[in-house]
Amino acid sequence: MPKYLGGSSEIDAEQQKSLLNREFILVTLSGFIFFFNFHAFLLLPIRIKELGGSESDIGFIMGATGLSTIFTTPAVGMLVDRWGRKWFIALGGLFMSLTTLPFAYIHTLNFLFPLLRIMHGAAFSLCFISAGTLTADVAPVSKRSQALGLFGVFTIVNYALAPFVGKRLIEAFGFDVFFEVVFIFGFLSFLIALLIRESNKTTSGAANGNGILTTLFRKGVFVAAFTLMISGSGFIPTLTFIPVFAEHIKVESFDLFFIAYTLSTLFVRIFGGWIPDRLGKKRAAIPSLFFFALSIMGISFASNATHFIEAGILFGLSHGLVYPSIYALVIDLSPNVDRGKAFAICSVSFTLGGMLGSFIYGVVAEHLGFHVMYMAAGVVCLIGFLVFSLFGKDKVFENGKI
């Protein structure tokens, strides 16, 4: 019997639990509103340029968030295992809103920009880790991948929605009003999180939980985390360099790649989110990782808008299953008292891979060109596919053993 289920009554309750239960809806809604605030800052480079900043200023200020996330995420993972998820979701929303409002009153480029962006990284860690972990807690075990996939849908939507709405706010009212409106969304995320009812069993026994390194080196977890790092090393640079690559080969409609990616990811998460739960996480992840690597390699051959659309569709369909499959697998391989740390390990692995990939492939692109860069990124992801296929595990944590 799984350690986190205490008896037949709990098993019956687990089997009868609805995916779209009250807590799942509230967590997802709070996360959606939080990420509207967070992803609205994709427009911050425009403000930085407006205030006289350079490309290096943009890179430094925007990169401060990712760096902060890497350092704060492990701590948040340990905290949510010990003290619960709900209050950290709320704290993330409150922290994000309070560090958004000052931008409405800063009219010169100064040290506050990177400092506030560092705080945004901490807010991201608080909300994403606690909300993702609670999503796994409140979802039926048999639909955990589907639940995490749906939760991720509302993050992905804001990659397009927040900049789209924000751009029109800026055009109509200016940046000051834009930041004030976005602040309201962060605060709404905080208020909705307060309505969540968290079961005591999510933190019972947390004092007996393991350290983050013990969780990382649990059988099967390290390979999954390594695979996520490799995936991140291909995912983030792919999105980062698409506009520059398209400009380099004289293709104006590069945005079609992002549209194709977003729509195909939403499609597979909504209509195929059941696949990892029904067929097995590893079984679903293996072909997804292969086609993910193939999609990145395919970008190196792109020469027109149609090629970008085709690559975007394959990129979205494959990554749309990789994320929920491997995240849910890591949680399956960890006991209840270590779920927060398990989710944090996934997040840090993916983010770290993305940061390393952006730096390394940027150098490759500068010296060898974008065609070589995308081919190299795809080959590295193919190695990740092989490692996971050979050494990845797909067993639920039972009685303290794998």
Image (spheres, rainbow, N blue to C red):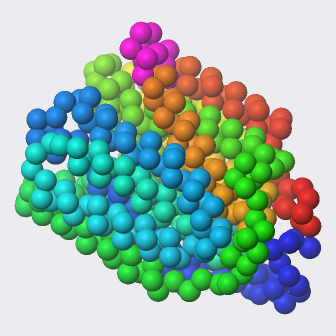
* Viewer-nearest residue: 16 or 208: 208
Asked if one can make out residue 402 in the rendered structure from this viewpoint, the answer is: yes
Vertical comparison of 261 with 278: above or below = above
Residue sitting at x 63%, y 61%: 78
For the C terminus, give its image quadrant.
bottom right
Relative to 57, say whether 14 is above or below.
below
Give the residue furthest to the bottom.
9
Q: Could you say where residue 379 lies in the image, as x and y percent from the top left? A: 62, 23
Q: Count how many numbered circles sit on residues in the image.
A: 0
Front residue of this view, candidates 137 and 291: 137
Q: Residue at x 83, y 35 (%)?
A: 390
Q: Position of residue 30 (x, y in %)?
A: 43, 73
Residue 359 x %, y %: 45, 26
Q: Is residue 38 left or right of residue 49?
A: right
**Residue 277 shown left or right of residue 44 in the figure:** right
Q: Left of 261 or right of it: where is 111? A: left
- Which picture quadrant has residue 179? bottom left
User: Is residue 318 or residue 345 the one in the foreground?
Assistant: 345
What's the magenta region? 362-374
Who's the residue at 78% across and 81% down the image? Answer: 15
Q: Which of 158/133 is in front? A: 133
> Does 371 lie within the magenta span?
yes
